[in-house]
Amino acid sequence: MASNFRIQIHRNSENVHLNLIGSFDGNSAFELIHALQDKCKKARKVFIHTCGISNVHPFGQGVFLKNFKGAGLNHEIQITGDYKALLDPMEDI
């Protein structure tokens, strides 16, 4: 795992905000998938903020996009920030 990666989680009413901070690699991608599955179960909407990411490794991007679709996430997810285009699974459509 990128030693400087972390996820700050903030909840307000029915929404959850995940602030990604640091370098996004393959292990970071799995950490984000697990956070979405574990910490966002009852959320109506989830915001993933990428403005704190310093860089996205291509392998991390691939791991996240491949595993996102099979993660069984049932809520609306919005990705914001400079790395939205790299991490938003809806950008492929």
Image (cartoon, rainbow, N blue to C red):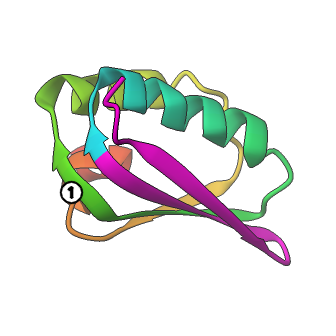
Q: Residue 34, how many percent across, how many down? A: 62, 29
Vertical order, 74 against 33 (above or below): below
Instruction: Check if residue 7 falls in the magenta segment.
Output: yes
Q: Quadrant of residue 27?
A: top left
Q: Tell me if I can see residue 90 in this picture.
A: yes
Q: Amino acid at mark 1?
A: Ala
Q: Quadrant of residue 43?
A: bottom right
Q: Tell me if I can see residue 93 in this picture.
A: no
Vertical order, 7 against 79 (above or below): above
Vertical order, 39 against 70 (above or below): below
The kind of secondary structure element at disc 1 is helix
- Residue shown at the point (26%, 28%) measured from the top left: 60
For the N terminus, give its image quadrant.
top left
Name the residue nearer the viewer: 91 or 31: 31
Q: Left or right of 65: which side holds 31? A: right
- Residue shown at the point (47%, 46%) measured from the top left: 6
Q: Left or right of 23: which side holds 5? A: right
Name the residue nearer the viewer: 9 or 75: 9
Task: Please report the bounds of the magenta region as a residue range.
Answer: 1-22
Q: Residues within 10 Å of mark 1 (few under 14, many from 20)?
A: few
- Residue shown at the point (45%, 22%) measured from the top left: 67
Vertical order, 72 against 4 (above or below): above
Instruction: Check if residue 54 falls in the magenta segment.
Output: no
Q: Left or right of 70: which side holds 49? A: left
Q: Main secondary structure of the magenta part?
A: strand
The residue under label 1 is 85
Report the number of numbered marks: 1
Q: Residue 58, how many percent across, how many down? A: 13, 30
Q: Left or right of 89: which side holds 71? A: right
- Residue shown at the point (38%, 42%) measured from the top left: 5
Q: Residue 85, how many percent across, how many down? A: 21, 57
Name the residue nearer the viewer: 75 or 37: 37
